[in-house]
Amino acid sequence: MTTAARPRRYEFMLLALLVLLWGSVGLNRIGIGLIFPQLRAEFGMPNWQASLLISGTSVTWAFASWAGGWLSDRYGRRRVLLPAALFICITTAAMGGAWSFLSMFLVRDLLGIGDGIGWSVGEATISEEVAPKRRGFSQAIFTAGYTLIGAGAGALIITYLSARLGWRWAFPLIGAATALVVIALAAVMREPPVRREHHAADWRSAARLLRNRSLVYLTIMGCAILSWLQVFAGFDHSFLVEVRHFTPIEAGEIASFWGFVGAVGSLLLPLASDYWGRRPVVLVSSLGCAASLAAYLFGGFDKAVMELLLGASGFCGFGLLPIVLATCVSEAVPESQRGTALGVTNFFAVLVGTTLMPFIGGLLADGFGFIATLCIPMAAQLVVAGFILAVTETAPRVAARPEAKLRQAA
């Protein structure tokens, strides 16, 4: 059955369930930063050690994303995604039972296996199950699940659950809710109708992808975007509570604007890039994100203005995620290599953006304070703005225009 022959109802149901699954990943990934003040006090951790609870998960995420994309190109999306999703449920719930830094670190490392597979295989599934004209927007909706549920609702859910029940109850409840999504996904999801040949997805073909200049630039930009995301998610709550002296509940309410408004950006900016091009939308968004974040850090504003500035940063920053890390990557390679390409770019982006940079952020926080740490996300957006100028335009509507064809021929 071709993509066009798939019932629209099936496409809608599958996308909705994948959004919920990816939102659950957002909860377990971003949620750890929301409880850092409690964990540091209970486990006696300095900031650099707390940052390893982000970095450790990212190492396994990186390898699992690459391997999961490759395996799904070879054996099928459903066979790889469903076991990974079940593993996410188990390891998310297990976070509530951690009794020390080391035990939490080990659970978070295991969690990264399922989370990483969920990214590359989920995005590859969507790229095959929706019509090309809706691909950018559909992948944006998928990414918005992480933002809306993980960063938006999660900032409220986890801070309130932690305040009322204690942080140990938050993650088992999230794991149980995720299990319901996985059951529904197992009942609905079918294997995408793409013929898979074993020789089309080997490790040598994955390595050859790195010769694609645009893919290399997109990988560098992915490193920067994930640095913005994970460093900010890990240390913003501590900045608001310990530097700006907001209460934990107030800090959660401010952070929720980052997620809620960011979810809107995750939808609107990729849609705009379908019409106006990936390059101009990414350039304007990255510069806007850096400017609003600078005002957020150094302006000394009250709660209402902080919410507006953080919402603007989230709108621009989260809008970049699906364009750069999903849509541009999918459009830069042949269809048979999409899962592998998504895994390869995510592998390097995660190793740098959510493994190395949070650790550096923790060291900066211990030595120079949280404002120094949060300058990393601001600088990362400037890196994105610089490299997007070197990437070939891939939006089908824009690339098909006569002037674009002339530039490519030249």
Image: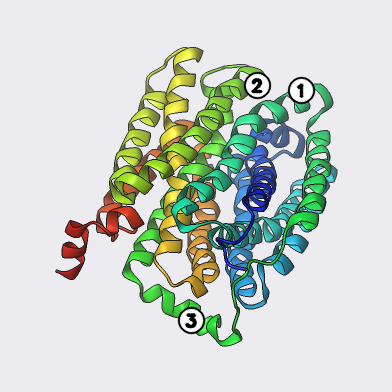
Where in the figure is residue 299, as x and y percent of width and height? Answer: 37, 19
Residue type at mark 1 is: Ala
Q: How packed is label 2: few (under 14 Cα within 10 Å), some, or many (20 or more)?
A: many
Q: Nearer the viewer, residue 64 or 284?
A: 284
| Numbered disc in front, either 2 or 3 | 3
Q: Quadrant of the N terminus?
A: bottom right
How many C-alpha atoms fall within 10 Å of the one at disc 1: few (<14), some, or many (≥20)? few
Left/right placement of residue 272 relative to residue 75 reads left
Depth order, front residue of 255/213: 213
Q: Position of residue 218 (x, y in %)?
A: 38, 59
Which residue is at 60% across, 85% downward? 198
Q: Position of residue 160 (x, y in %)?
A: 73, 23
Q: Which residue in the structure is indicated by mark 1?
A: 163
Tell me which residue sits at (48%, 46%) in the image.
137
Residue under numbered circle 2? 248
Real-space CA distance between mark 2 and mark 3, rounded to the nearest whole angstrom:
48 Å
Res 301 seen here: yes
Mark nearer the N terminus (2 vs 3)? 3
Instruction: Name the residue beneath numbered marker 3.
Output: 205
Residue type, label 2: Pro
Q: Is residue 183 above or below residue 297?
A: below
